[in-house]
Amino acid sequence: MAIFEVKLPKMGESVAEATITSWLKNVGDSIELDEAIVEIATDKVDSEVPSEVEGTLIEILFENDATVNVGDTIAIIETLEENAIKTEIKIANKATEIVSIIEEEIKEQIKPIEKISDSGKFFSPLVRNIATTEGLSMEELEGIKGTGKDDRVTKSDILNYLENDRNTINTPKKPKVTEVKQPKIEKQSKTTATPVSLNGEDEIIEMSRMGKLIAHHMVASVQTSAHVQSFIEVDVTNIVKWRDRIKDQFFARENEKITYTPIFMQAVAKAIKDFPMINIAIDGDKIIKKKAINLGMAAALADGNLIVPVIKNADQLNLVGMTKAVNNLANKARKGKLSPDDIQDGTYTVTNVGGFGSVFGTPIINQPQVAILALGAVRKVPAVIETSEGDFIGIRHKMFISHSYDHRVVNGALGGMFIKAIKDSLESWDVNTEF
């Protein structure tokens, strides 16, 4: 017999932890190679962890809703392999002894936070560790409003409390002093949530876990970046005519449907190469210039939420390759099959608001990026056509593209020149282009 430790796998450079959402196997169950044994969730995507061996599940080390670091052992499988590595067991046992010694020393210095409070509220190991390190009392911890399942306090909740609310919430009351009345407008300027009035006909719908994460991410982005927008109208008549001419031939040869999206994504990748200071991120007072051009592509999930899978090294793809990449990621998003790697390392994002009929939009930047492009609906409109014989009115296919960018590092000139380059690239499309 041999012992195999199931570890939480690495899920991208920016993902350091995950939450156990559901165990798919129980202790004593047989496990097959590559069989999923547990479902996990990160702030990016939900996924399953498959087994790397065959055997029997003999121990589960973390309960549902526990937060686990990448690389931690989450379960033990007993295998039938004869070449067991006893050294690993000895090292694990020694590590357990060391951890026990450290824990005892910590207990002597700091009173730990209990797993379950007197009121019955549950706190995950990660939250309890943060609370202990920061010197939070159980009374303070219970006062934090939780956004997790069953109102549990998450890592984001406690960090937000420590950063923003600790000095104003659950602090010892000061002696009462005479309050100077402020003008009414001062009270209205406070950023507290307005109470919602309910009646018997109203329906209360709990936000999904992903919905809460998206909401938090969007608010954080607005609070972080100085959003500015530029808009430009693009004549895509040649592209529409070209696609109408070749779409059947394209499908017959490549077994892929070609939409406008891969054409637009190619134009964006080309413009980024010409204006690389759009392809950056901010780290404090430092600007990180990204070498790879990884285009995020906002896609709709089955539950109505949006997710942003990433086309890696988009500037290196020809039109066929870009089409296959776009279709593949869109299909995986609709079926809920995106992997953690599919949504990592984006450097610039494109969202297609025109798919819902919008003429243009003002999208929120996908942090830590500094810009995002919105593609409006393609419409037939009357337009002035300039010719050598004079100006005429004709029917053209046009669309608006909207560019939101972080004015801390991208000024109006760069933001405007960038979308002008995209416009020029799209309007110069040759209707005789081969694919």
Image (cartoon, rainbow, N blue to C red):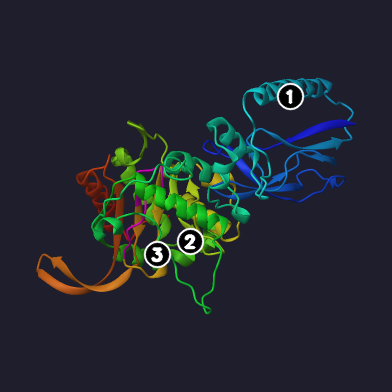
Q: Earlier in the sequence, mark 1 or mark 3?
A: 1
Choose mark 1 or mark 2, whichever is in front.
1
Q: Residue at x 40, y 34 (%)?
A: 291
Q: CA distance from mark 2 to mark 3?
A: 9 Å
Nearer the observer, 218 or 174: 174
Circle count: 3
Residue that badge 2 annotates: 250
* Residue 369 part of the magenta-drawn span: yes
Give the dominant element type of the magenta stretch: helix, strand or loop: loop
Task: Examine the rendering and report whether any part of residue 232 can be seen.
Answer: no
Q: Secondary structure at mark 1?
A: helix
- Image quadrant in which you'd find residue 232: bottom left
Dot 2 surroundings within 10 Å: few (below 14), some, or many (20 or more)? some
Q: Position of residue 40 (x, y in %)?
A: 65, 47
* Residue 115 part of the magenta-drawn span: no
Residues in magenta?
360-372
Q: Seen in the image, is 67 located left or right of residue 57?
A: left
Residue that badge 3 annotates: 243
Q: Seen in the image, is 400 located left or right of residue 194?
A: left
Q: Residue at x 33, y 61 (%)?
A: 361
Q: Position of residue 34 (x, y in %)?
A: 75, 44
Query: What residue type is disc 2 on?
Result: Phe
Q: Earlier in the sequence, mark 2 or mark 3?
A: 3
Query: What residue type is disc 3 on?
Result: Arg
Q: Position of residue 53 (x, y in %)?
A: 80, 38
Q: Earlier in the sequence, mark 1 or mark 2?
A: 1
Image quarter where the N terminus lies is top right
Q: CA distance from mark 1 to mark 2?
A: 64 Å
Task: Examine the rendering and report whether any part of residue 387 can be seen.
Answer: yes
Nearer the observer, 361 or 161: 161
Q: In the rendered structure, find residue 100 and report the number of the disc placed on it.
A: 1
